[in-house]
Amino acid sequence: MVKGRQGERVRSKSNQYPNTSLVQIEGVNTKEEVSWYQGKRVAYIYKAKVKVKGSHYRCIWGKVIRPHGNTGIVRAKFTSNLPPKSMGSRVRVMMFPSNI
Amino acid sequence: MAPRTKSSRNPDLIRGVGKYSRSQMYHKRGLWAIKAKNGGVFPRHDAQPKPEAPAVKPPKFYPADDLRATITPGTVLIILAGRFKGKRVVFLKQLPSGLLLVTGPFKINGVPLRRVNQAYVIATSTKVNIDGVNVEKFDDEYFAKEVEKKNKKGEGEFFEAEKDEKKTLPQGKKDDQQAVDAVLLKSIECVPDLKTYLSARFSLMSGMKPHELVF
């Protein structure tokens, strides 16, 4: 899986749209490189105090939708919106669904 | 009878309430006359033989056609998710459900005969020669879950017996695995380093960019 940093929400000057997050994938620096990652699943993994299904770790799944701008940032949509505390945190970009 | 539009003989007073009662309607519809004509019983028609069930429609989606061009029998695949993620594995054939039949071989990397979804696999350019491997008998039913027999047992026996039943893989499946692998191992050992390649896991190292890798 590839490392990425998840950051801002998609926004205009005064409004933000929390359903889509921006993800910076390491090593991806141009819009053309993003096409490989389109559709790939993304996971935001976090810890919680209460154990759910035997684990302290929890995950929100999402997928890479499209590039955002020209320098390799990517838009990702998650099954539920990412919490604000996740801004700037690590996100895992998986290599599946694969098309190679 | 001349075709006629069906108009109800029972005009509505209000929606849901007709002008005539059931017995009045019985008279108006002439059911008494039909019955009299048929010997006091309302005529029945035996069910007509049903027209033959329409031929099975050709399925809209043929999963077998959807196979990526890079995946051919004998290709080494990298499994991306699940218990065997990162394992390099030999592709045998595509099953009718669209899933890929794959084997480690078991001796090399512990992956048994298994089904894998195409989307969770990267096809490498490495190919193994699989002439002589007989995969005819494997299809989706082979991998179907065993239906557990329902035995009513006493409370005490219940827990013990469950433990015993679950663990072993039927010997038939082990034999199938060995039969397929025996042929494969010979082809693999012919190629230098292929065995160690298959036993090693794939992983992304620091600085490796998947979008730039050539598989």
Image (tube, coloured by chain):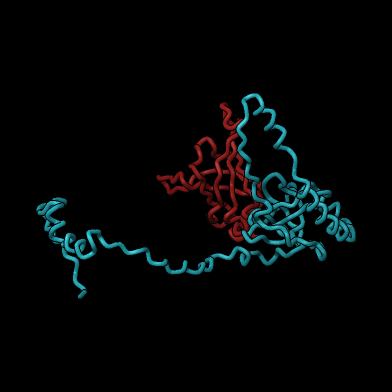
Chain colours: A red, B cyan
* Left or right of residue B65, residue B41 in this image: left
Residue sticking out furthest to the bottom:
B2
* Left or right of residue B82, residue B178 in this image: right
Res. B152 image quadrant: top right
Give percent across and percent down for residue B201: 78, 48
Res. B19 image quadrant: bottom left
Q: Can you say which quadrant of the picture contains the C terminus of chain A?
A: bottom right
Q: Does the image show residue A44?
A: yes
Residue sticking out furthest to the front:
B39
Q: Nearer the viewer, residue B122 or B28?
A: B28
The answer to whether B35 is drawn above or below residue B178 in the figure is below
The answer to whether A1 is drawn above or below residue B129 in the figure is above
* Left or right of residue B181, residue B83 in this image: left
Q: Residue at x 73, y 59 (%)?
A: B137
Q: Nearer the viewer, residue A70 or A22?
A: A22
Q: Does the image show residue A29?
A: no
Q: Nearer the viewer, residue B191 or B45?
A: B45
Q: Residue at x 80, y 56 (%)?
A: B180
Q: Residue at x 51, y 67 (%)?
A: B56
Give percent across and percent down for residue B17: 13, 51
Give percent across and percent down for residue A45: 59, 38
Q: Nearer the viewer, residue A58 or A88?
A: A58
Q: Residue at x 63, y 40 (%)?
A: B149
